[in-house]
Image: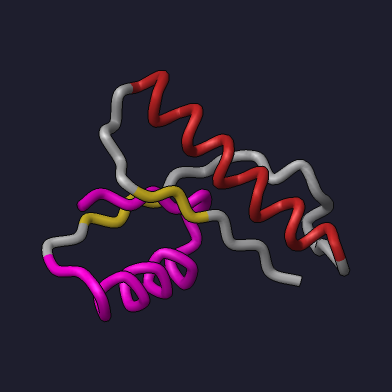
Amino acid sequence: MKILVGSENPVKIAAVKEAFGKYYQNIEVLGIAVESHVPPQPVNDETFIGAKSRAIHLKELNEKKKLNADFFVGIEGG
C-alpha cells in the first residue's frame, strides 16, 4: 500500500507511518512537498483548509504522475 503525505517534514511522515502501520502491513509512505494555501502558522479553520488542500493536491499529483498511491494525507499544524 502506498501512502502520500503532503509534506517533507519527517515528524509528519513518521506519524503517518505509525498510524497506518497499526492497521496495515507492507506500507510505503512518501513525503511530497505540496502547497497548503494557508499561512505558515495557520489558526482555526485554516488548519482544516490547509490539510484538505494538501490532500487534494496529492491526489491530483498522483493522477498526473501515475504514482499509484492508495491514500493521500494532509496534515496541518495549528
* Residue found farthest to the left: 26
Q: Identify which residue is drawn at 66% across, 43% down.
A: 53
Against 29, residue 35 (above or below) is: above
Q: Which residue range is magenta in the image?
A: 1-25
Colouring of the image: secondary structure
At x 76% / y 41%, what residue is drawn? Answer: 37
Tally of numbered discs: 0
In the image, is residue 38 above or below residue 24?
Answer: above
Quadrant of the rendered image containing residue 35: top right
Residue 39 lies left or right of residue 51; in this view the side is: right
Is residue 46 covered in magenta?
no
As drawn, the residue found furthest toward the top would be 64
Task: Say above or below: 37 vs 10.
Answer: above
Q: Residue at x 25, y 75 (%)?
A: 23
**Relative to 59, is 65 on the left or the right?**
left
Q: Is residue 19 magenta?
A: yes
Q: In which quarter of the image is residue 40?
A: bottom right
Q: Is residue 5 above or below residue 19?
A: above
Q: Is residue 44 left or right of residue 13?
A: right
Quarter of the figure with the C terminus: bottom right
Q: Residue 42 at what x, y percent from top left?
A: 82, 62
